Image: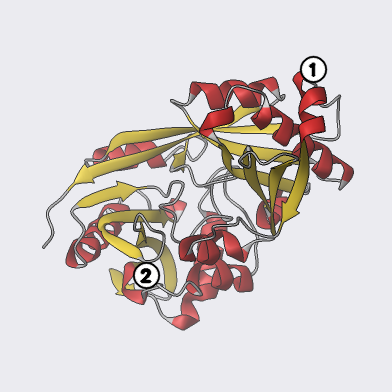
Amino acid sequence: MIAYRHFKNQDVPALVELWNDCELGPGAAQQFSLDSFDQFVLAEPYFDRKALIEAWDGERLVGFVHAGFGPDASGARLCQEQGIVCVVMVRPGFRRRGIGRRLVEMAEDFLRSQGARGLQAGESLNRNPFYLGLYGGADSAGFLETDVHARPFFERMGYRPSESYLLMGRELQAGKLPFDPRMVALRKSVRLNVLDRPPASTWWWLVRHGRFDSLTFTLIPNSGMVIPGIVTCWGMDLHTETRGRRTVGITDLFVAESVRRKGYAKALLCEVLRFFREDGVAEVEVVVPEGNQPAQSLFQGLGFTPRDRGTVFRKETQAG
């Protein structure tokens, strides 16, 4: 008889053991510590034990689901209009018994009770309250193709693909770094500046990316023009432990509209790649929306290749 209940503090060892047993694919960190799970999931200021629902077979945890919410447009507080099924997993020997379905239904009920009018399955970009650093790549990208059980499960639950992302990566210690003749002239007009966080860090950035070691790189103009480019990079430490090689994620690349298509993005990223190559980083990763062809072309030109794809699923609901 399967019993369902909300999270209790003593459940952390069982949750981490279940995570490692659930065959989530190469996009999931493995064999991380209980402290890491506590830091990146349970210690978030908006964590609600009622949103982490567990399935138990006697004294053995056999499945869990975790639901949550992303930020509002200002990044200053949660927005409860869009509910997120962040993760769901069932131990392999207990699948196809309706446990996963029941867990998701209970998560949906919780989200509706908090006012959700739409439901999203899979964390993505800013809508990633808990599992950045544990699942996905340089940013959250929904459920990954290499997590082969996710897509058919959510489609059976009535969810439909809504967003798709391409996970791209590049080896740093092999081969030459890219070169663009425009960079010679650009280097005379700007200089690289390194910060410990983005200049306009929101509450949401601080509680999510702020938990990781990160650096923000900006191009500072020698003249009075606007800052042409900015990008943030963070150490994917738990993935590094799993892969046995040091990995850095690239996020939040922005180039001022007035100077786009002039080589600033490529120049900035080349400086970033050189910085991390000299620091001994083995690989860098980035997540790009699959419909953003200019971004894909930019990173392909820098030697990045596709490694995985992620999908976010949605279905509409009515608040209860």
Residue 135 relative to residue 317: left or right:
right
Res. 157 visible in picture: no
| Marks 2, 1: nearer the viewer | 1
Quarter placement of the C terminus = bottom left
Dot 2 surroundings within 10 Å: few (below 14), some, or many (20 or more)?
some
Residue 11 relative to residue 54: left or right:
right
Q: Residue furthest front?
A: 224
Q: Where in the figure is residue 93, as x and y percent of width and height?
A: 44, 53
Residue at 86% from the left image edge and 29% from the top image edge? 174
282 vs 184, nearest the viewer: 184
Going by the numbered disc 1, the residue's amino acid type is Pro
Q: Earlier in the sequence, mark 2 or mark 1?
A: 2
Q: Which residue is mark 1?
A: 181
215 vs 309, nearest the viewer: 215
Q: Residue furthest top?
A: 181
Res. 156 visible in picture: yes
Residue at 67% from the left image edge and 41% from the top image edge? 224
Q: Which residue is mark 2?
A: 56
